[in-house]
């Protein structure tokens, strides 16, 4: 099966515009829509959902820590109870707005620091699993395809959840299969390197790390970040590589 293509969208806020949602949506399979905590507002959420409906794109909630100023990229110290509550709050908001348009959300993909903490801290991953297991609708959880993805899937299956594993078109990997921090040189790939990485993932199921190591990844979907202008401008070429 061909890998799907997902993108973080709906990240504008008020008079501030982020991303090229109108240009991207026709070419992707899955839209990760911001829920207002790191970006997005009710009108942006409504408009992005309508766009996803128009192009029959699967919708995922893209919740984060409550961090509009830092675009959700700052790790906050939250208890498990707080994480469960903030996941429920954001997912329910997007889910309700989707229902109002006659569509449904299919999965959840945490954003930014919450995503990174989920992948590094077992207690955060467990809290997110608990939140989704308690939610009254069955939703998949999208997380990073790492060499130890089987462990995450096993834990999720215990609470009846499905995992979508994703790789990143526009980010460089370290030897452990993690993303290089954005402040590190070479963390965000050029257009040429991005296309080469997508081609390698599609054809071989592998990525080449910063040191040159080859990692095999079990990938369901490939992500292009909505705030990476080079990435979204190359979306058609990326989609062609995955077809």
Image: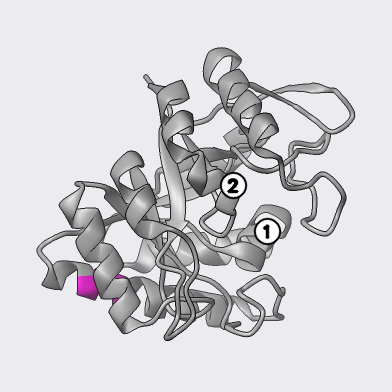
| Position in image of residue 81 (x %, y %) | 54, 80
- Left or right relative to 46: residue 159: right
* Residue 149 or residue 27, whichever sits in front: 27
| Position in image of residue 62 (x %, y %) | 45, 64
- Residue with the mark numbered 1: 116
| Position in image of residue 3 (x %, y %) | 43, 28
- Residue with the mark numbered 2: 230
Q: Would residue 60 be visible to someone looking at this image?
A: no
Residue 94 sits inside the magenta stretch: yes
Residue 221 higher or lower than 34, as above or below = above
Around disc 1, counting alpha carbons within 10 Å, would you say few (fewer than 14), some (14 to 19), or many (20 or more)?
Answer: some
Q: Name the secondary structure under disc 1.
A: helix
* Residue 77 or residue 219, whichever sits in front: 219
Marks counted in the figure total 2
Q: Quadrant of the C terminus?
A: top left
Q: Would residue 54 be visible to someone looking at this image?
A: yes
Which residue sits at x=53%, y=39%? 166
Residue furthest to the left in view is 102
| Position in image of residue 37 (x %, y %) | 50, 80
* Residue 195 or residue 86, whichever sits in front: 195
Of circles 2 and 1, which is in front?
2
Magenta stretch: give its range. 92-97
Quarter-of-image position of residue 122: bottom right
Which residue sits at x=60%, y=59%? 125
Around disc 2, counting alpha carbons within 10 Å, would you say few (fewer than 14), some (14 to 19), or many (20 or more)?
Answer: some
Quarter-of-image position of residue 117: bottom right
Which residue sits at x=12%, y=68%? 101
Q: Quadrant of the N terminus?
A: top left
């Amino acid at each position: 099966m061909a890998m799907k293509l997902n993108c973080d969208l709906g990240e504008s806020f008020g008079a501030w515009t982020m991303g090229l949602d109108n240009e991207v949506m026709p070419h992707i399979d899955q839209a990760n829509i911001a829920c207002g905590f790191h970006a997005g507002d009710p009108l942006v959420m409504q408009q992005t959902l309508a766009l996803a409906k128009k192009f029959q794109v699967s919708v995922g909630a893209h919740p984060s820590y409550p961090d509009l100023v830092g675009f959700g990229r700052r790790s906050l110290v939250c208890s498990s109870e707080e994480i469960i509550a903030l996941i429920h709050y954001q997912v329910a908001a997007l889910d309700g707005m989707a229902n109002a348009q006659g569509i449904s959300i299919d999965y959840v993909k945490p954003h930014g620091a919450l995503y990174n903490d989920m992948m590094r801290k077992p207690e955060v991953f467990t809290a997110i699993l608990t939140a989704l297991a308690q939610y009254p609708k069955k939703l998949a959880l999208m997380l990073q395809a790492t060499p130890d993805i089987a462990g995450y899937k096993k834990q999720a299956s215990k609470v009846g959840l499905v995992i979508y594993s994703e790789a990143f078109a526009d980010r460089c990997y370290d030897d452990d299969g993690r993303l290089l921090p954005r402040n590190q040189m070479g963390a965000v790939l050029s257009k040429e390197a991005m296309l080469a990485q997508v081609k390698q993932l599609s054809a071989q199921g592998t990525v080449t790390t910063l040191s040159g190591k080859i990692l095999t990844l079990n990938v369901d979907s490939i992500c292009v970040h909505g705030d990476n202008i080079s990435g979204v401008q190359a979306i058609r070429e990326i989609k062609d590589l995955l077809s």
